[in-house]
Amino acid sequence: MPALEMIGITKRFGALVANRNVHFRVERGTIHALVGENGAGKSTLMNVLYGLYEPDEGEIRIGGNRVERLSPARAVELGLGMVHQHFMLIPTFTVLENIVLGIEETRGGMLDLDSPRKRLLELVGTYHLEVDPDALAGELSVGMRQRVEILKVLMRGAEVLLLDEPTAVLTPQEVEELFKIVRLLKSQGKTIVFISHKLREVKAISDRLTVMRGGEVVATDETASVSESDIAERMVGRRVLLDVKKQPARPGDVCLEVRDLCLIGGGAKMVLDHVDLQVRAGEILGLAGVVGNGQTELVHVLAGFLSPSQGSVWLDGRDLLGMSVLERYAAGLAHIPEDRHRHGMVVDLTARDNAVLGKQRAEPFSHWGVLDEDAIRQEARARITQFDVRPPRPEVRAGDMSGGNQQKLVISREVAREPRFLIAAMPTRGVDIGAIEFIHRHLIELRDRGVAILVVSAELSEVLGLADRIAVMYEGRVMDVMDAASATEQRLGLLMAGVRSQPEAIAP
Ligand SMILES: Nc1ncnc2c1ncn2[C@@H]1O[C@H](COP(=O)(O)OP(=O)(O)OP(=O)(O)O)[C@@H](O)[C@H]1O
Ligand SMILES: [Mg+2]
């Protein structure tokens, strides 16, 4: 018995057909993966299902019944819950307040937070989704915000969970945690639609999978019957290189030097604890670690969003900490941020404006304070072409582009600065495998042209594939720095857990 069925769904945005005659059927109590390139139409399909978009054609059945005029409120009544690709929490509200938003209960005319708090803590217990109900959402790591979104959906009693790239920002450990939760939900008869670009995950968790390409469904299969490279080929329409190919680095002088950097956070916690790091021109330093161990803060100090409590940072021998954000860019820094919506782009502006964001006041995009629209449009076209951003139209609103395409636009803009030092924080977050291959090749090319690169990634395979040297962070400290050649997933995993030396071999 299908939990849901979408029959002949077509959804257009103006001339663009985001979903074309899509048939999508999910059996009750199964985990069904939905995969496809950036812009293939996955999020759109889920948004149609959730009643956010009205389809131009087609029919939706939930629990066997045809539903008309679906709205998100109606979808929730019908037992659907959605965790969006870009989180929707209100940063100034607490976790609990975010969770009750829209299902507030009152007692004697007052907002009642006691009974929701009780139910929330029950859910936290059942699913081992540790969160602090009183933490401010805006201060949570992305991994934590992810949990809150799932709890929010569970609080509404969802039977069918639509998870749009829930693992894009999680560490391998967090992914394992999430999978435990997802399997637990399945064992309770719930149905899960799981969108991901990570084929290893798709293979590990899903019962069936549907591949979309160009707005259409290419195939639906039992997951066990297809290999990772089969899936990749169906998604992209060609064979894809799943490994990074590169020559050994030829590092030059030290480009970025971090000395004795400390950052004291709330409760006198050492968020950064005497960090020393060097990145040479022409090398990629990978920064590995479980999310929340200071990597984000380190990047934010380098980028100029946070001031450290002590220490110094030198870029080509110049004191970086004394510079404003714009001065840092002028000095040769570029930054692909971990949270593209917060620090990488303005979703309400066009792709064109985002393609020059932060550079618009300088030559060649302004002359004597006047924007040069032609130069900006030309630059946007170049950026779009270079990274195959879709749709290839400078005038499209950035927020209307698919997540992966937004990411490509941000990367393209940052790389075009021709930096001396590039920070790439989760550079392939939400990007499809074809584009990952492209981005990785591009980063290696930049390295070979002498750029110093810091890659921060929760994806161990990405760090191992890209980096020439790897630094592991744990609780604000750099645990160790090693040549990538001598790093293994196991060694990194131990360091990421705070274990410095190999434990004694355990006797059989
Ligand atoms: N609100 C909108 N207005 C205009 N175009 C849109 C809108 N939402 C999506 N699109 C377009 O529809 C197409 C499908 O986008 P969608 O977000 O569904 O892709 P996706 O498969 O989720 O991709 P990704 O893996 O990058 O998240 C894209 O070309 C996108 O630009
Ligand atoms: Mg999407």
Image (cartoon, rainbow, N blue to C red):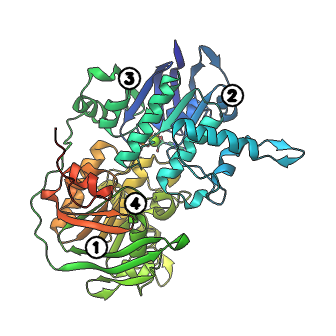
- Does residue 421 appear left or right of residue 89 in this picture? left
Tag 2, which secondary structure?
helix
Residues under numbered marks 4 and 1 in contact, where contact means CB atoms less than 8 Å apart: no
What label does residue 77 carry, if any? Answer: 2
Of the two numbered discs 4 and 1 on the same chain, state the one appearing first in sequence.
Answer: 4
Dot 1: within a 10 Å radius of its alpha carbon, few (fewer than 14), some, or many (20 or more) residues? many
Residue 72, given in percent of the width and then of the height, sits at 65, 35
Distance between mark 4 and mark 1 Cα atoms: 16 Å
Residue underneath mark 3: 207
Mark 1, residue position? 421
Q: Residue at x 50, y 38 (%)?
A: 15
Q: Is residue 403 visible?
A: yes
Q: Nearer the viewer, residue 148 or 341?
A: 148
The quarter of the image that holds ligand 2 is top left
Q: Which is closer to the viewer, label 4 or label 3?
A: 3
Classify residue 472 as left or right of residue 2.
left
